[in-house]
Amino acid sequence: TETTGLSGGAGTYIFMTGLARFSAAGDELIVRQYLLPDPAVEPDFLERIRTELTAGEAIVCFNGKSYDLPLLQTRFLLNGFPPLPEELPVIDLLHPARVLWKTRLDRCDLQSLEEHVLGYLRPDDLPGALAPERYFRYLRRRDPTLLEDVYRHNQDDMLAMAALAAAMNRWLAFDHPAEDEALACLVRYLDTHGRLAEFEQMLAEHAERLAHYAHGHAVIGYALANLYKRLGRRAEAYELFDHLTVTRPREVPAAMEEVLIYEEHHLRDIRRALARCEEYLTLMAAWPNAGDWRERLEYRRRRLQRKLDRNEPPADEE
């Protein structure tokens, strides 16, 4: 949508809406753009948009859940239309874009993603903030040429969304030169949000690839081990945490603590855990800015030592 302001309140009009859908054969993107020629005909304008949206299987947007759709629902309500059906799925591309690319991009707005992910820089694009002023000039002069840049900007947004969705599909299928980066982002997302069912499906489809990257990529390895732990596959998690403490300890010091927890509480081998803790502390002694982790391991070492002292058999019984 192109609107008369960014506040999103009842006084904000949608003056242009772009809708795009793939043809039945899937080889064309059909773009349809609606203009509100005068606020007096807003009901007819909204009815056409609502008819198209409800005829689709889903709505794909970019930041639409937060801005475009709430504003559309407000305009429907004010003009006597029922809201869009709640069961109509909404796919907001902003959220998966942040999952996949926020770690390497300063911004995840649509045009930044176009430039850095799709490799396209719009020539002479009209900034969206200038669109309302063009529309107000059009209402005064009734000169449609004033809106040519707005139409082009709106159309480019839709083309960008279609291309971005295709890029996401490639990344999520790991059919991409940067597949390890995509995998790291996805595994970290599943771990952060506790999406265990999706993780199990991912394991079933990409077990070999996951194992390959887990042993050479600290972020993937740690998140993957954490997901194994959440699934109750603790031995596999321990093996991976242990591998990370040997190969990439400075990148994921939390793996050290996970190893100690497993050895203490699941293997019930206090002596082994204490010896391992001493090794980690010796290793950390040379690290700058490791104070917090050293404190945590020092606390765990003292606790393990007390536990060992309480359970240590007398010398003549050893």
Image (cartoon, grey):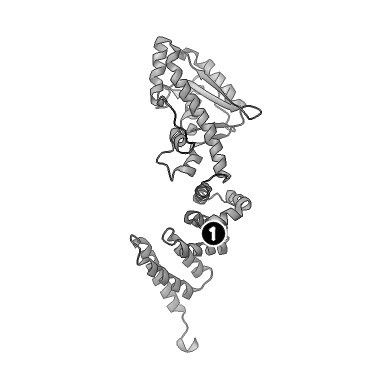
At mark 1, the secondary structure is: helix
Residue 135: image location, x then y, percent: 42, 17
Name the residue carrying label 1.
Answer: 229
- At 35% from the left edge and 61% from the top edge, which residue is drawn? 290
Q: Amino acid at mark 1?
A: Lys
Q: Residue reaching furthest right?
A: 25
- At 37% from the left edge and 68% from the top edge, which residue is drawn? 298
Q: Give the number of callouts.
A: 1
Residue 169: image location, x then y, percent: 57, 40
Look at the picture and state if 46 lies above or below 230.
Answer: above
Q: Nearer the viewer, residue 134 or 310?
A: 134
Q: Nearer the viewer, residue 11 or 146?
A: 146
Q: Residue reaching furthest bottom?
A: 316
Structural crowding at the residue carrying mark 1, measured as other residues with C-alpha within 10 Å and reported as few (<14), some (14–19) or many (≥20):
some
Residue 79: image location, x then y, percent: 50, 19
Image side of residue 80 versus residue 286, left or right: right
Residue 154 in view of the camera: yes
Residue 201: image location, x then y, percent: 62, 50
Look at the picture and state if 144 lies above or below 270.
Answer: above
Look at the picture and state if 7 lies above or below 304.
Answer: above
Residue 80 in view of the camera: no
